[in-house]
Image (cartoon, rainbow, N blue to C red):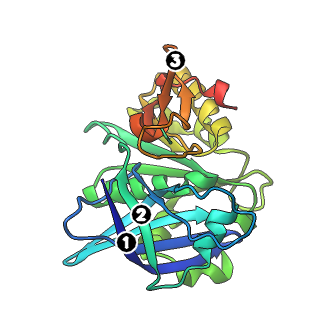
Amino acid sequence: MRQLSTPLAVNNPIAPDWRHLAFKWPAELPAPLPGQFFTFLPKMVESEAGIVLRRPIAFAGFERASDGGLAHAIYQVRGPATRALSAMEPDDVLDIIAPLGNSFPLPDEEQHALIAGGGIGLGPVLFLADTLEKLGRPWTLVLGFRSAERIPWNGHFKSAILPAWQHLMNQAVITTDDGSHGLRGTVADALDLSPLLTRPVHLYACGPSAMLATLASLAVRWNLPAHFSAEQWMACGVGACHGCVLPASTGGYVRVCADGPVFDSRAITWEACL
Ligand code: FES
């Protein structure tokens, strides 16, 4: 983990309120892994901004190069901090601390990776699927959206993306709540019908708490090994403030930033997070 100032390379819209961010990665830092995240310090200019805290964003991909490489992320513009981030231009300098948190464990040799993502959980699951693809390991990606217009890379945003993501999206099973694209329903609905559940699989997920709670029940019902990445509000991002805790199933709490963000699905009482 290190604090650094690094130039932005990409900050493009990929869907309404969604951006693809990429920034230079120093050669001396270990490459980020799927599940890990960084925090950025927003340059606030809005009068209502209040106290400025670092904000976490999960890595969504990494491209190694001789000078270090490019780290990629996907974020939603939904408050003053992300609005400030979305106003930054290529070559503007971003203040980050990275890499933070743990990562998804790889599936066992005989296991097929069943990877589910929804909403703000899109970045980590794309990164995991891309990593497994490069390792030659089998994976299936199931992505859920509210409607067709919320799917990144539909229509005119298509030219703004990382080629690896388009390859992954082309192979993904897509669900929408309103049935306007792919299967009607949720990722849990699609997974419950999957013939893969009768084979050795390892379930991975990142997304809203309601989705993770449903998938945790599915993992218990099908007796699947499962690891989920939690998305949580953070203050310090490094384990000091306890502002990011989730209820542990054994009692007490775990810190998402320092103990996670990836947890065995059985370690968290997801229903209590709703
Ligand atoms: S954000 Fe401070 S302990 Fe996690």
26 lies left or right of 118: left
Name the residue carrying label 2: 96
- 45 or 273, which is in the foreground? 45
Alpha carbon distance from label 1 to label 3? 37 Å
SS under mark 3:
loop
Label 1 Cα crowd, 10 Å radius (few <14 / some 14-19 / many 20+): some
Residue shown at 58%/39% (left/top)? 191
Q: Is residue 100 above or below residue 172?
A: above
Give the image location of residue 210, x and y in percent. Answer: 68, 36
Give the image location of residue 129, x and y in percent. Answer: 41, 55
Closer to the chain start, of discs 1 and 2, is 1
- 155 or 22, which is in the foreground? 22
Q: Quadrant of residue 150?
A: bottom right
Closer to the chain start, of discs 1 and 3, is 1
164 lies left or right of 178: left
Alpha carbon distance from label 1 to label 2? 6 Å
**Residues at circles 1 and 2 in contact by the CB criterion of under 8 Å:** yes
Residue type pointed to by label 3: Gly
Q: Which quadrant: the C terminus?
A: top right
Name the residue carrying label 3: 252
Q: Is mark 2 within 8 Å of ligand 1?
A: no
134 lies left or right of 59: left
Can residue 153 be seen? Answer: no
Closer to the chain start, of discs 3 and 2, is 2
